[in-house]
Amino acid sequence: MLIYNICYIQRGNEVLLLNREKPSWMGCWNGIGGKLEAGESPRASMERELIEETGITPTGLTFKGIVSWMVDGTKFGGMYLYAARLEESYTYNTPIKTDEGILDWKRVDWIMDVHNQGVASNMPQVLQGMRSDRHCYDYHCIFEKGKLLDITATQIDSTLERDEVQREAYLQKYAVMVHSS
């Protein structure tokens, strides 16, 4: 049911972000990610996407949950959420132009600034939750006509990353919501 992934790579007080040249979030800064390929596990997909998009192979890739969304009450989607840490001394010079957009390090305080309209609208809340809590969450976002209306964080079990049956059972509630609207 989930076909995307996203990772926030932190180095000290900075996060490596991508300013996307394509939808979704075109023109906004967001984490690094992509789409799962057929038969690929969420973790294997995330590792592949990180190497393809950045050339970085982080050693501390941590599953942090999922970001799910409902758009206009009818369209459900979601992605696997990961965090990675690099040593502060890790050298990765940016900006870097890629096929997907521009990679650059952004300070956490800049990302979280309430006046910042250049980041994906749900990213500050998701990133704050990831940084402040060791648990995994489903950050469920409600969008209406392109605007983020609400985010609800529900703690989930980390086994959802690996256990497809458990994951699909958990996500079934969203399928019911889509069909009942």
Image (cartoon, rainbow, N blue to C red):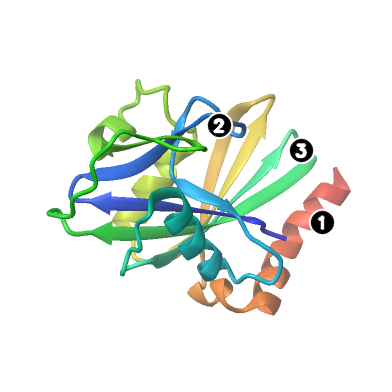
Horizontal and vertical percent position of residue 148: 57, 31
* Near-viewer residue (170 or 104): 104
Q: Quadrant of the C terminus?
A: top right
> Would you say 101 lies left or right of 73 here?
left
Question: Mark 3 or mark 2: which comes first in sequence?
Answer: 2
* Amino acid type at mark 1: Val
Q: Which residue is mark 2?
A: 25
- Under mark 2, the amino acid is Trp
Q: Measure how far apart labels 3 and 2 are at the Cα level.
A: 19 Å
**In what element is the residue under mark 2?**
loop
**Is residue 65 at least partly visible in the picture?**
no
Q: Can the viewer see residue 111 in this picture?
A: yes
Q: Position of residue 34 (x, y in %)?
A: 56, 50
Query: Residue at image x 53%, y 29%?
Result: 21
Instruction: Name the disc covering residue 65, or none.
Output: none
Cβ atoms under marks 3 and 1 closer than 8 Å: no
Nearer to me, 121 or 91: 91
Quadrant where the N terminus is found in the figure: bottom right
Residue occupying image coordinates x 61% and y 79%: 163
| Residue at the extreme left | 89
Q: CA distance from mark 3 to mark 1?
A: 12 Å
For mark 1, what is the residue?
176
Q: Earlier in the sequence, mark 3 or mark 1?
A: 3
Tell me, yes or no, whether the two marked residues, 1 and 2, touch with CB atoms within 8 Å.
no
- Residue at figure coordinates x 63%, y 60% from the top left: 36
3 or 2: mark nearer the eye: 2
- Does residue 15 lie above or below 35 as drawn? above
* Residue for badge 3: 73
